[in-house]
Structures are given as structure tokens and as C-alpha cells.
Image (cartoon, rainbow, N blue to C red):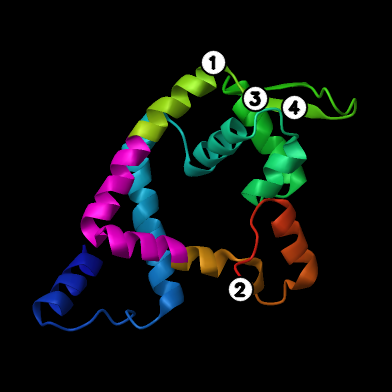
Amino acid sequence: MAGTKARQAHTARGEPHPLSGYAGIALRRASLAVYGAFMAEVGTLDVKPAEYAALLVIQGNPGARSADISGLLGIEKANFTVFLRRLERRGWVAREPSTTDRRAHALRLTPEGIELLQAAVEKRARLEAGLVARLGAVDYARLVELLQVLLAPEAAPGKGAAASARAVQAGFPPKS
């Protein structure tokens, strides 16, 4: 591939990548690399990153309403409804009548969803261990911390107090 040869030529000459000075581009490229590694490792279970995240959040919040889960995942309610139907069709999630609100449904993982998530968590742990090995434990922890700073509501331009309030309600308090 031409892109690979160009990267190798820059590296061989000891030159930085032409885009190395741009944080946003580096984040996007790193995201794509981690996504590819996720799909190579966890994707063998036929689960995508968004599905994995949803299963983790539902497992950690059994009985939560779909609106709560969509908020935690940062997915619009209307889009989450379609997404949730797919998880249900795959047999990983079930909706049950809420014990606290007759109009709402509580979400839970099915036995199949629990089994899939356990296998996915094991594979994801290997992926994370690879990142720790590559970065070192201290830099890995710092990277996660810095990413959380970027994800904090006040870091998003133009989002204002309403977005901050929604994020806090969803369990993502801003750092002080």
C-alpha cells in the first residue's frame, strides 16, 4: 500500500508523520486503530463496540429504563430504540415491565447476553492489557484520564449548561 510505504519512509528517515502535530487527527487515527484491534479480538464474537458498551452499561444498571441507558451511552432516545430492538432480536437483552413506572420498561441481559458479555470482557481485557504493555501502566492511566477530560461536558464547545446537566444526570460528572 502506498500509505504504508510513505509512513515507513518517514520513519526510516527519522521524520515525524506529517499529521503528528494535530491532536484531533491523532485521536481519530488512534480511535481507528483501537477499533480495528477491538474488531480483530472481540469482533470474533460478532459484537460491535457500541453493542459491547450497551451490554456493559445494562449489566451495570439492571432494571434501568431505556432512557437511562441511552443517556449513559450518549445515544439519542429515538436511535437507541432501534438499537435496542437489534439487541433484543439477537437475544442479548430483554425488556420487562418496570416495577416503579407502569409506562416504562426495565432492561436486563438475557442468559445469552450474559454469556456473550463474559466472553467479550475476557477478550477486551486482553486488548486493554496490550495497550498497557505498549504504553506502560502510568501512561495508560494518564491517557484514560486525559480522554475523560476531553469527554467532560464543559470540553464540548457550544454545549452549555443543559448538556452539562444531562451528562451529570447520566452519571458523568464534570471534573472539578
Q: Are marks 3 and 4 in contact (CB under 8 Å)?
A: yes
Q: CA distance from mark 3 to mark 4?
A: 7 Å
Q: Label 1 is placed on what type of residue? A: Pro
Work out which quarter of the rendered image holds the C terminus and state it: bottom right
Q: Return the disc, 2 or 1, that comes first in the chain's sequence.
A: 1
Q: Amino acid at mark 2?
A: Ala
36, 103: nearer the viewer: 103
Which residue is nearer to you in this view: 40 or 68? 68
**Residue 14 in the image, given as x and y percentages of width and height:** 12, 82
Q: Residues within 10 Å of mark 3 (few under 14, many from 20)?
A: many
Label 2, on which residue?
155
Name the residue that disc number 1 marks: 111
Q: Is residue 138 magenta?
A: yes
Q: Position of residue 149 (x, y in %)?
A: 53, 68
Q: CA distance from mark 1 to mark 3?
A: 10 Å
Specify the amino acid type for callout 4.
Ala
Q: Residue furthest front?
A: 176
- Compare marks 4 and 1 and give the one earlier in the sequence: 4
Give the residue drawn at x 67%, y 33%.
84
At 60% from the left and 67% from the top, the residue drawn is 175
Q: Nearer the viewer, residue 33 or 137?
A: 137
Q: Nearer the viewer, residue 140 or 16?
A: 140
Question: Magenta span: helix, strand or loop, mainly?
Answer: helix
Image disc number at residue 106: 4
Residue drawn at x 39%, y 57% is: 32
